[in-house]
Image: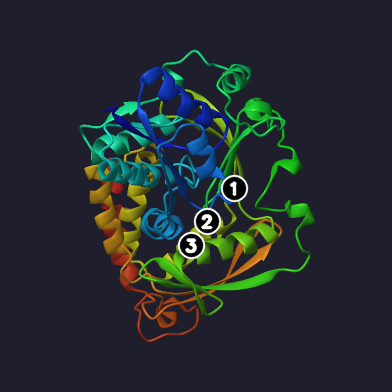
Amino acid sequence: MKEKVVLAYSGGLDTSVILKWLIEEKNLDVICYLADLGQEEEITGVEEKAKKCGASEVFISDLKEEFVKDFVFPMFRGNAIYEGEYLLGTSIARPLIAQEQIAIARKTGATHVAHGATGKGNDQVRFELTCYALYPGIKIIAPWREWDLNSRESLLNYAEKHNIPVTASKAKPYSCDRNLLHISFEGGILEDPWSEPDEEMFVLSVSPEKAPDEAEYVEIDFEKGDPVSINGNKLSPATLLKELNRLGGKHGVGRVDLVENRFVGMKSRGVYETPGGTILYKARRTLESLVLDREVMAFRDSLVPKYAQLVYNGFWFAPERLTMQAAIDQSQQEVTGTVRIKLYKGNVITAGRKSPFSKYSEAHATFEADEVYNQKDAEGFIKLNALRLMLQNR
């Protein structure tokens, strides 16, 4: 009996060729698996195509709610942002895709899993670290690190030779990856960092220049760090993020053009659209400024660079990330309230915030006369803080 492999399959050229290659070159029984994370690609016919190419079984998993609730929201509670700009839309999707792949491997008795990530990128690391963390004995096949099919032309020739159905279309001049949090573009015409992205490339957002001339106000309610409603309407996590994408995209919010450092060592230029995530990032920080203790906020913020690096590099299931998450989640217990924001031509502008756990005291902060603060106390406070400076320079 042939050993089984679970292939992360999209139905595109690369994974269709991989499917046949695993059968022909590895003599494996191939089970195809497609994760629906809100990429909104046409999945009709994918199961039929996979079976026509030789797959013995096909699993299509709807993971949209789990993706936002158990991966995106915990990451946002940590205010994770990589190298100052990237909200980690692709990075956070990979551990969930691999988690489900391992679950299917266990369910079907597969001894192998396979993916279509290249040997140059971050995704191979993210997929495989997750697989090894969740199933230490699993065997992983990464065809791009093995085969000699190193170009689109060679893949097309292989597909023709093996009667693999390929939709006839002109190759996009870049690579893109989409889920409910964002869409990314890289490679091709974007490999020149001096080259401005073509406006026709963008999918989720209009350009700020073409955004409405009138600002739009949006209110977001949070409970313990997570958004729960928009303009008073309670929504599921996935539905809420989708609506924020619509609102942000309408106003040109969330575009990022970044040259980032990949885990494998090279620099890579990526262009991202994260309209809903950008709104959430700004709104959460606005609410935190009202409710978080100064030292708690400083401590949590000190974790952000390392936390973001762990997510980017694929260590979602590592003990250090889980430990950080516990501390982060503790800090979010009072991050409950409402934030009013104004969307205007690419900008997310704070227009108001309120919370039952507000630490703001108008009585203490006022510039008018008050009866709760003795200004003379500041003199001793300053002198004690200045003592070591005075001794240093006496």
In the rendered structure, the answer to whether residue 157 lies left or right of residue 313 reads right
Q: Which residue is mark 3?
A: 238
Distance Cα–Cα, label 2 vs label 1? 20 Å
Q: Amino acid at mark 1?
A: Glu
Front-most of 390 and 326?
A: 326
Distance Cα–Cα, label 2 vs label 3? 12 Å
> Which quarter of the rendered picture does the N terminus lie within?
top left
Do tag 2 and tag 1 residues touch (Cβ < 8 Å)?
no
Residue 351, position as x, y percentages in the image: 59, 72
Which comes sooner in the sequence, label 3 or label 1?
Answer: 1
Are there few (<14), some (14-19), or many (20+) residues within 10 Å of tag 2? many
Q: Amino acid at mark 3?
A: Ala
The kind of secondary structure element at disc 3 is helix
Are there few (<14), some (14-19), or many (20+) residues within 10 Å of tag 3? many
Residue 138 lies in quadrant: top left
Are there few (<14), some (14-19), or many (20+) residues within 10 Å of tag 1? few
Do tag 3 and tag 1 residues touch (Cβ < 8 Å)?
no
- Nearer to us of marks 2 and 1 is 1
Residue 228 lies in quadrant: bottom left
Q: Which residue is mark 1?
A: 41
Residue found at x 52% / y 31%: 16
The kind of secondary structure element at disc 1 is loop
Q: Amino acid at mark 2?
A: Gly
Residue 257, position as x, y percentages in the image: 61, 39
Residue found at x 30% / y 47%: 390
Q: Which residue is mark 2?
A: 277
In the rendered structure, the answer to whether residue 39 lies left or right of residue 378 reads right
Front-most of 193 and 96?
A: 96
Residue 83 sits above or below residue 357 on the image: above
Front-most of 287 and 181?
A: 181
Residue found at x 48% / y 23%: 266
